[in-house]
Image (spheres, rainbow, N blue to C red):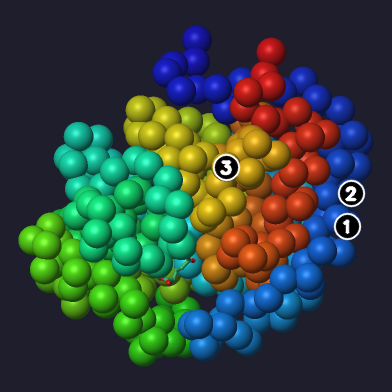
Amino acid sequence: MPGKGAWLSMKNELLTDRAFVERVFREAYEIGLSSASRGTVASYIPELKKADPKAFGMYMMTDDGYSLAFGDCLERFSIQSVCKVIILAESLKLFGFKETFSHVMMEPSGDSFNSILKLDLASSRPYNPMINAGAIELVSLLVNKVGYDELLDETRALCMDPAIDLDESVYHSEFETGDRNRAIAYLLKSKGVLMGDPEKTLDLYFRMCSLSVNAKSLAGLGLVIANNGVDPFTGERLIKEEDVRTLKIIMFTCGMYDYSGKFGMNAGVPGKSGVGGGIVCAARGPMGIGFYGPALDAFGNSSGGVKAMVHISEKLRLHVFDYN
Ligand code: GLU
């Protein structure tokens, strides 16, 4: 009997027809590829400008080892904001739900991911862990307890990808141009809520954003989440069941920038995107899906990735409120 919040591990009969599943994914890839180049590659971190706007890849895996790979799915890129899922998972693991959410709220902010407005004017507690202020606050908690190497190991395990490493050039680029994040960290400090040294906090945050992943690594992360926190291939529990439930809810409500509501409406799965062009989705199957498409839409999400996921979700009935 699945436990609390175990809805993503419900079996999806549509997945047993593999020819159908493959057709759906192939169509989604074509849709994603054709709209991929319509967006714009992020440029505020200079190193990200180098990405090919036409690149597009996706990877899907289920708990029985079934996988599908398309296009540039093995191309490495920086994880960027997708690391906020890992930061939240680590905070829940080390500090628990109550302590974690005494430092951040669990509400969509309605402002851009790197906004400073509400933090200054509305609440000293960042609105949620998926915006920069929330992630930086949680990293300030973590920095006193774990080092970068430990977080890197956690990331490798959660993504089932031992090859994840720091992209040094992205890290330096983030570090040199991260003044808005510095402003956030120091504003948190001025309000007396930052829990660690601001420079150490920022360094760890920049490092986490600069980890080099691919669509396959994100599919791995999605699968671990969809599989209720257990690596299906080793049987090892990586995230507590109750923490996975929290991750899924926060991803669903706040994971796709100011498009989270519409993504919830149209794709209906927990997802998290980053300005490097990555999207992780956790879906019923249990299934993990990772996307790479560095051309971003007006909201900052991979334009090809969003369109492809909506198609997959519609055809395979993945919307969390459509299960029966
Ligand atoms: N490293 C980026 C920043 O802090 C992450 C942004 C994102 O992917 O949303 O600005």
* Residue at screen point 74% across, 37% down: 313
Please give the label number shown on residue 261.
3
Which residue is pictured at 39% across the width and 34% down the height? 246
As drawn, the label of residue 30 is 1
Instruction: Give the spatial CA distance, label 3 vs label 2.
Output: 24 Å
- Residue 307, image x, y percentages: 76, 52
* SS at mark 1 in the image: helix
For ligand 1, which image quadrant applies? bottom left
Can you give x and y, in whole percent of width and height, for residue 38 in the image? 78, 70
Q: Label 1 to label 2, Cα distance in Å?
A: 5 Å
Cβ atoms under marks 3 and 2 closer than 8 Å: no
Is residue 109 shown to the viewer in this render?
Answer: yes
Q: Distance between the residues labelled 1 and 3?
A: 25 Å
Q: Choose the circle earlier in sequence order: 1 or 3.
A: 1
Q: Please state which amino acid type lies under the numbered disc 3.
A: Gly
Q: How crowded is mark 2: few (under 14 residues within 10 Å), some or many (20 or more)?
A: some
Q: Quadrant of residue 304?
A: bottom right
Which element type, helix, strand or loop, lies under badge 3? helix
Task: Judge the density around disc 3: few (<14), some (14-19), many (≥20) Cα neighbours within 10 Å.
Answer: some
Which residue type does callout 2 highlight?
Answer: Glu
Q: What amino acid does circle 1 point to? A: Glu
Residue identifier under label 2 = 27
Q: Is residue 74 visible?
A: no
